[in-house]
Amino acid sequence: MVKKFFKISQITSLLFLFGIFTACIESKEISSYHDNHWEDHYVKSETSGPQKDSLQNGKTYLSIYSHIYSFSLEKSQNLTAMVSLRNVSDADTIYISKADYYNTNGQLIRHYFKKPIYLKPLETVEIVIDEADEKGGSGANFIFEWSSKPETPEPLFEAIMTSLRGSQGLSFTTQGRRID
């Protein structure tokens, strides 16, 4: 009887400690914006930037891989993707009005900001798609819409996909392609 009581008591204690441990873990958004906050880059008003009719507009496509296949369709490797939005101009600000993330089937997963943002000359901001975020699939992609002065170089959109397992690492990059 005493042994049974101690065994039940040990199990109860372990369950209690497990409950405390799991309750202390903060829930985390799977996909995140690195370092800064979008609010820090929102265009304040229509008059704070150049007049819209003086800007060239563009649209860029960027491929992303949430996972890649390994050996066969049944075995895949999840990846972390760091999406880099870069203003390559050393003189002019650029404006990005859309950063939308789509899955392999072309379905919208999420919008990344509510209103246009600006990037100062040579500034870079990043979007990180965590390894645990499997929503995109092997054919995920972004569509970016942007504006700049006609003589300003186009922004650069790149992604670095990485995964580390034990002592082995995997990484590769993709670059955006202007589609409009």
Image (cartoon, rainbow, N blue to C red):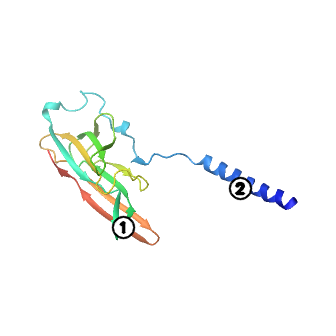
Q: Residue at x 69, y 53 (%)?
A: 15
User: How many numbered marks, from 0 up?
Assistant: 2
Give x and y (percent) for residue 169: 39, 69
- Is 113 located above or below residue 170 in the figure? above
Residue 5 in sight? yes
Name the residue beneath numbered marker 2: 14
Q: Amino acid under label 1?
A: Leu
Residue in the image at 29% along x and 44% along y: 107
Q: Is residue 148 left or right of residue 76?
A: left
Note whether 120 is above or below 1 in the view shown. above
State the residue in front, 82 or 69: 69
Tell me, yes or no, if residue 89 can be seen here: no
Q: In which image quadrant can residue 175 be found? A: bottom left
Q: Amino acid at mark 2?
A: Leu
Task: Name the foreground residue: 48 vs 58.
Answer: 58
Quarter holding residue 46: top left
Give SS at disc 2: helix
Q: Identify the residue at horizontal 45%, vertical 45% (top origin).
A: 29
Which numbered disc covers residue 170? Answer: 1
Depth check: give the residue in front, 112 or 70. Answer: 70
The crowd level at tag 2 (other Cα within 10 Å; few <14, some 14-19, many 20+) is: few
Point out which mark residue 116 bears.
none
Q: Nearer the viewer, mark 1 or mark 2?
A: 2
N-term-proximal mark, 1 vs 2: 2
Query: Residue 55's x, y, as percent?
Result: 15, 36
What distance separates the C-alpha of mark 1 from that of mark 2? 38 Å
